[in-house]
């Protein structure tokens, strides 16, 4: 039997239905609870913000939902992947000062230690990594 918080328990998986933007809040809460349980609450604010940006983008720009996977490595490195069902790569925009959208990837680029996009199957995975302080 494994203790809570051991390596085998440091995974979070969430499947989101198409256009279910209400579920984004639930994913944020589950992610924060997992990070607290795993002993890295200092990652929660940034991870929650960036994960919600990627999940929201996936739900707004695809028709078949999204899947979020979060893994905390033994080295205390958090990797969050959001998989969707379109192979169209995300593009960074330069939003106007009054725009209410278009800043998601700018935030990911500014706050994540590393990030990227990989084509996978019939879609893509957009991911980011954060290291514990």
Image (spheres, rainbow, N blue to C red):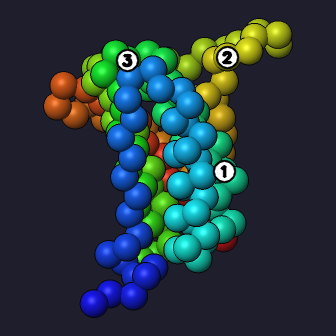
Name the residue located 74 percent from the left edge and 15 percent from the top edge.
100
Q: CA distance from mark 2 to mark 1?
A: 18 Å
The 10 Å Cα crowd at callout 3, few under 14, some 14 to 19, many 20 or more, is some
Residue hosting label 1: 46
Q: Earlier in the sequence, mark 2 or mark 1?
A: 1
Which of the 4 image quadrants contains residue 118? top left
Residue drawn at x 69%, y 66% as measured from the top left: 42
Place residue 9 in its image quadrant: bottom left
Q: Secondary structure at mark 1?
A: helix
Q: Which residue is mark 3?
A: 62
Of circles 2 and 3, the one toward us is 3
| Residue that mark 2 sits on | 101
Question: Which of 12 and 88 lies nearest the eye of the viewer?
Answer: 12
Q: Most extreme residue toward the left, as rendered?
A: 121
Q: Quadrant of the C terminus?
A: bottom right
Q: Is residue 44 above or below residue 14?
A: below
Residue 41, x across and y down, in percent: 66, 68
Label 2 residue SS: loop
């Amino acid at each position: 039997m494994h203790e809570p918080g051991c390596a085998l328990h440091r995974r979070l998986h969430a499947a989101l239905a198409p256009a279910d933007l209400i579920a984004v809040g639930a994913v944020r809460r589950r992610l924060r609870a997992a990070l607290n349980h795993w002993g890295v609450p200092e990652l929660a604010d940034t991870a929650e913000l960036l994960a919600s940006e990627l999940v929201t983008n996936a739900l707004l720009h695809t028709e078949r939902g999204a899947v979020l996977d979060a893994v905390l490595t033994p080295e205390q490195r958090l990797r969050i992947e959001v998989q969707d069902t379109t192979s169209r790569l995300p593009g960074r925009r330069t939003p106007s000062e009054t725009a209410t959208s278009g800043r998601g990837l700018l935030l990911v680029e500014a706050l994540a230690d590393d990030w990227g996009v990989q084509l996978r199957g019939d879609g893509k995975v957009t991911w980011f990594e954060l290291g514990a302080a």
